[in-house]
Image: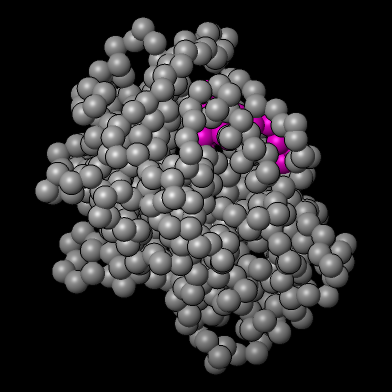
Amino acid sequence: MRRLAFLLLAGSLVLSSSTSLLARDAPANTKESAGKDDNVQAPTSESAVSTKHSVSIGGRSVAYTATAGNLIIRDEQGQAQATVFYVAYTVDGGKNANRPVTFLYNGGPGSSSMWLHMGSIGPVRIETAAPAATAPAPYHLVPNSDSLLDKTDLVFIDAVGAGYSRPVGKAEGKDFWGVDQDVSAFSRAIQRYVTLNNRWNSPKFLFGESYGTTRSGALVDALQDKGMAINGVILMSSILNYGVRMPGYDEMYIGYVPSYAAAAWYHGKVANKPADLKAYLDQVRAFARGPYATALAKGQDVPAGEADAVAQQLAAYTGLSAQYIRESNLRIEPARFRKELLRDQRRTIGRFDARFEGVDEDAAGEVPGYDASDTGISGAFITAFHDYLSGQLNYHSDLEYRPTFGDIGKDWDWKHQASGIKRPLQTAYVAGDLAHAIRTNPHLQVLSVNGYYDFATPFFITEYDLTHMNLEPSLRSNVHFLYYPSGHMVYLNTDALRQLKGDLARYYDSTNHS
């Protein structure tokens, strides 16, 4: 199918060309203009379409209004720069001015918010066969009893260039396609929505997935710098530091080991399989940060006996052979692991979700030919969203809706002016911005949501980033971690989604100060 999706473009930064992308690959031959689709002009004024609906959540009927529309964001001279598409869900009959509102977005860079919108905590969701491949149409869009709409209003926002969002006027893609440019655009869009809808006094939350967490880390600090204090930030499947993904560093290899072990456990490749995955992964974490990290730190000079011992233990945890690990110089690249784990069954495993299995042309290759966890769901999500937008939300546009836009990832400016650092960083590190946001707003609560089987943004690396923010002891309890037996898109596992809804409800109840 189309190699669509979020181009999280760790690109040239990650381990090798075979494992270079941290989210969905974008098409390499995209030629569309950033602002026009076949001479269709993007709107330069704001408009919206509202429809009435209801959904049963927790046995209670919740009446709500769905609003699909666009926001115009402007430069400092007041000139329109972009039209930003959004879909908002607001509960009817409530005191909206004081009700929590959550802004949600996917990552890429270059992805629309369609994935979170159709799969997670909105009032409807697409049914899939995950972790098996979902059959072609007709698909089934169903009411979402695990929606978070009973706790917060929801606003799904598309990045400029993705979805129906486009540059307008004299603006060009380069004005938005970069770490800091993107944060500026989202900051202005959120402020515009809040102003337009009288939500300044509402508790406010940010919910990002994948590169959306990179955005959130810097965005929360930028919004607070503008005077908009944020109640909470939800980071699903995080990537907060691209710097350690440069060649020559071993942190990525160390960070993937618990994810490898989780996948081996799931697929029955661990001898005497432990019953308790959580306890088992605690053992693996200790090995990864201990003997394994020590051996890698010695580089090419690690003694042969030590290398053999580490290879044997790593083989026990990962299901690979000790010989394969030794021949890999103790450093297992994610794409190679995905090909090697089930090679004896002539199967590969998914990157976004290692529970998925794929079949290549042959079993002899070095890396998988495709990501089964991408192709297995993309058709369902894209088709369902198009049908839903026109059929239920009554929103129509002559523009092409772009689930992702390849030019954004190719042209992305990775430099970032980080909080407290004088010179721009050459690649994104935003955990420092997030830490600054917590220090300046000690009520800010950060929730890290992780899937054990996520090979795009491994949970052990997220733990490292969030525990290395140099927070004072009094602030460390502001950061919380949740784990689920799922992948990058945690909500694809409906049991995990149900658990996630309960966890999020408790988080909102404890964080909302209204």
User: Where is residue 348 shown, x and y percent of the image?
Assistant: 77, 61
Up-down: is 472 above or below 364?
above
User: Where is residue 319 shown, x and y percent of the image?
Assistant: 76, 65
Residue sticking out furthest to the left: 77
Q: Nearer the viewer, residue 343 or 361?
A: 361
Up-down: is 371 above or below 72?
below
* Residue 79 left/right relative to 120: left
* Residue 124 left/right relative to 169: right
State the quadrant of the N terminus: bottom right
Is residue 82 rendered magenta in the image?
no
State the quadrant of the C terminus: top left
User: Where is residue 240 shown, x and y percent of the image?
Assistant: 39, 58
Residue sticking out furthest to the front: 39
Up-down: is 467 above or below 365?
above
User: Where is residue 104 shown, x and y percent of the image?
Assistant: 41, 38
- The residue depicted at 35 percent of the width and 39 percent of the height is 43
Up-down: is 4 above or below 155?
below
Counting labels gives: 0
* Residue 254 left/right relative to 422: right
Q: Quadrant of residue 388?
A: top right
- Evaluate whether residue 186 shows in this view: yes
- Evaluate whether residue 449 shows in this view: no
- The residue depicted at 73 percent of the width and 66 percent of the height is 369
- The residue depicted at 39 percent of the width and 38 percent of the height is 85
Q: Which residues, given as a range, are shown in magenta? A: 116-130
